[in-house]
Amino acid sequence: MCMRFTLPILLAVTGYCLSVTAEPSANAGLSANAEPLSLPQALQRTLQHNSVLQAYPYQQRIAEANRLQAGNRPLPQLDVAVENILGSGDNRGLAGAELTLSLSQQIELGSKRQRRLDVAGWQSQLQQDNYELARLDVLADTTRQYIQLLHLQQQRLLTEQKIGRETALLNTALERSKASNLHEADISRIKLKLLRSQIALTNLDQQLELQRYQLAARWNAGPDFSAVTGNLATLPLLPGLAELQTRLQRSPLTNRYLTQQRLAQSRLQQAEADSTADITLSAGLKRNEAQNDTSLVLGFSLPLYSAGASKANRLVAQAEQELAATQQQLNHTELNLLLQHYLLQLNTLRSVTAAIANQLLPQAAHLLATSTAGYQQGQIDLLSVLAADEELAQANLELVESQSRFHLILLELERLTGQPLALSGPVPLAAMEHK
């Protein structure tokens, strides 16, 4: 099986492979020496052990055998005929026997053999195109599971940070309670928030464990890794729409549609060739026992084809060819619209992510800092501090969600074009926004 990456799928070979690890603290069933898993390692394991891809080499061998079979010419035929035997009178026994021994050969007309080879060749190519698409789908699925696991790891890290802030707030409240200027209900409220966060952390640990198994299932194994490495904050720059449309024209998906159209055209040509009748030539010897005579026999045969059946076959093949051409055109339009839709979503998510990171998060952090300081000085009530902490936690979750969503949509765009899309080298963002 070919082990190359035509689709490095997002974060792997394109130069912005995820580099930061957010490891969960609990991984049931793993040894203490379990190592984090990188995306290239996950993709390599998928290529080697995925059950869907394992079947394609056998299917390709079947297609190649069919191609060899299509190239075979009609085999010669040996004909033996015995007449005037076991009769009566002069033909009693073998006395009047006539033995004819001849060799016949069918001659194909209308380039039938070449047409069969063309059809078999395009069928083999279609099988290869289907394999390429299946490989991209499998790798994309692995990457999708990888991103979702990375997303959960980041959520767990944020939850741990939230627990740290709530624990610090609880300690501050306990210090204030010693001065008898804090209600017991305020301490209970903080403890309740802390308990909810700890429950959320336990739930995330369970989700992480399940997601690790779902990722490892892509190569039919159990998880032997503690976490995956990565940094969702890295949002790569993308080519412009014109470049993406050019890449779409060379994508495996477009190639398959073209192959289907060419296969339909070859089948039409084969149907036209099959309407030409073949001839059979024969030559042999004839032995007449009664006259003790041997002579040469020559023969020629031409089948009577049904014009109606031949025309029907051509009409079916022609309809299939027209259908393939129409589908190719419709799919071309649909894929271009889908490409534009993905690109618009990515641009929107990039703007949203920048707004959260550069505006919302700093404001939320500032609000929490001032609220905490005011609370320590007795100038702000506890509810205001808890509300500020919730704003910061929500902003962090929204940032991770938008980053994860960006990578998932980029994955679909790469799957559509069949190529990595991250630009290499320093490219100003403003230059890309004006394309």
Image (cartoon, grey):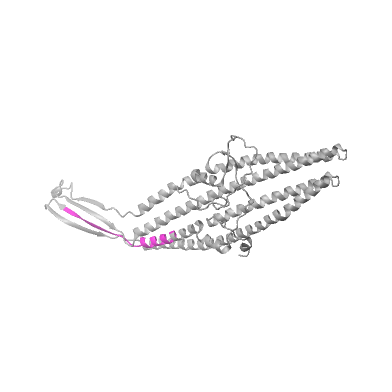
Residue located farthest toward the right when viewing the structure as drawn: 180
Residue in the foreground of this view, choosing between 361 and 289: 361
Residue 105's x, y, as percent? 26, 56
| Residue 110 left/right relative to 7 | left
In the rendered structure, does residue 86 fall within the stretch colored magenta? no
In this view, 270 is above or below 233: below
Query: In this rendering, does residue 193 appear at all?
Result: no
Residue located farthest toward the front when viewing the structure as drawn: 426
Residue 74's x, y, as percent? 30, 54
Residue in the foreground of this view, choosing between 86 and 40: 40
Quarter of the picture containing the C terminus is bottom right
| Residue 252 left/right relative to 212 | left
Query: In this rendering, does residue 195 appear at all?
Result: yes
Residue in the foreground of this view, choosing between 130 and 157: 157
Give the magenta range. 263-286
The image quarter in which residue 420 lies: bottom right
Residue in the foreground of this view, choosing between 301 and 400: 400
Residue 300's x, y, as percent? 25, 60
Residue 371's x, y, as percent? 81, 48
At a point 38% along the width and 51% down the height, the residue shown is 66
| Residue 170 left/right relative to 22 | right
In this view, 374 is above or below 250: above
Number of dots carrying numbers? 0
At a point 11% along the width and 52% down the height, the residue shown is 292
The image quarter in which residue 174 lies: top right
At a point 68% along the width and 40% down the height, the residue shown is 203
In this view, 417 is above or below 154: below
